[in-house]
Amino acid sequence: MTRPPLNRRLAEFGTTVFAEMSALAARTGAINLGQGFPDTDGPEEIREAAVRALRDGRGNQYPPGPGVPELRSAVADHQRERYGLTYDPDTEVLVTAGATEAIAAALLALVEPGDEVIALEPYYDSYAACVAMAGGTRVPVTLRPHEGSYVLDLDELRAAVTDRTRLILLNTPHNPTGTVLTRAELTAVAELAVERDLLVVTDEVYEHLVFDGAEHLPIASLPGMRERTVSIGSAGKTFSFTGWKVGWVTASPELTSAVRSAKQFLTYVSSGPFQYAIAEALRLPASYFDGLRADLQAKRDLLSEGLAQAGFEVYRPSGTYFVTTDIRPLGDADGFAFCRSLPERAGVVAIPNAVFYDHRDAGAPFVRFAFCKKTEVLEEAVSRLKRLG
């Protein structure tokens, strides 16, 4: 061949670090606290709802392109009951193959080649790939560690906006740092978007996983934002059925139609029977969501305390199910090397945060651990990590 087979937009993206670290866990028998998937299934009644849909022949053929009406109505009801946001399930809700497809479809639909997309660094690795596929230019605004958490510099955000900026890509609660943007921070972002006529795509898949009384506030609920915001949700993190790949978009009719135009040429449709099950899941009582939050907060505390005892500097998250740590107190500074050696040293797998940065040096000494695992698994991991001390 006269030229490389991979187009130049994707040339910088190889196999994801999640695949590498999960393979390392399988090869060494280490406990996998790298990739963010639970090791238990979600509610039994929701799994049975999927089985019932399969047996009843619902969704075994192509579902409607926008998603089954039952799920679109459940999403609209969820947004209204939780946040006071009213969406028409027929024109303002779109079901996707997980949040990952929703992000890809939104960026492919809304970004022209040469447009700038601001994202909060460190960011989930698919953001960078999707901006590249759309032909956009990513502009990172870095969340920085401060007094035990990560914070957004609003002045830096404002300075990043240029005449070429098309949209701001938000993620709150934020993966990997666990930051939950405050009402004041989101208000400032909203005011900037209105002032500079920017779109906002907001990834809110961890909306129900907030701790210590933190509030998840959808930016679409703030003045001037509903008509310029594409909000993305997902069932995987909330109901522990990550393999079902059921996500959704809520937005104005114009934005929803634009995203659907791209989405229909990606998967067209997906997850037919599972859509009916997730429609039932979204209608679970508040006690389910409260119980999930309490369970994960206890697991966060267990792992955070164990990591601190092992010698890490720990940034205790306000949301998600990830803990970011600084490895420098252990005498290390290279997160990649540390994570590749950790299975042999301690029988545990983690993820180097540098993969979430454009500025790799800024993320070099930080490592992410997932706590969405059984309590006994986390206890064993904590016991093994003590070897580092």
Image: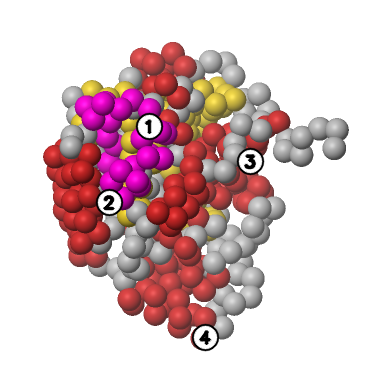
Q: Residue furthest right?
A: 2
User: Residue 131 is drawn in which quadrant?
Assistant: top right
Contact flag, marks 1 and 2 (Cβ < 8 Å): no
Residue type, mark 2 in image? Phe
Residue 256 against residue 128 in the figure, above or below = below
Contact flag, marks 1 and 4 (Cβ < 8 Å): no
Of labels 3 and 1, earlier in sequence is: 3
Q: CA distance from mark 1 to mark 4?
A: 49 Å
Of labels 3 and 4, earlier in sequence is: 4
Q: CA distance from mark 1 to mark 2?
A: 19 Å
Residue range (magenta): 323-347
Residue type, mark 3 in image? Ala
Q: CA distance from mark 3 to mark 1?
A: 35 Å
Residue 236 against residue 5 in the figure, above or below = below
Residue 327 against residue 320 in the figure, above or below = above
Depth order, front residue of 95/254 = 95
- Label number found at residue 147: none
In this rendering, position of residue 87 left or right of residue 83: right
Quarter of the figure with the C terminus? top left
The answer, for residue 4, to whether it is visible in the render is: yes
| Callout 2: SS | loop
Q: Which residue is found at the position 57% from the left and 75% from the top?
A: 59
* Residue 134 location (% of width, % of height): 65, 35
Q: Nearer the viewer, mark 1 or mark 4?
A: 1
Which residue is identified by label 2? 371
Which residue is identified by label 3? 109
The answer, for residue 80, to whether it is visible in the render is: no
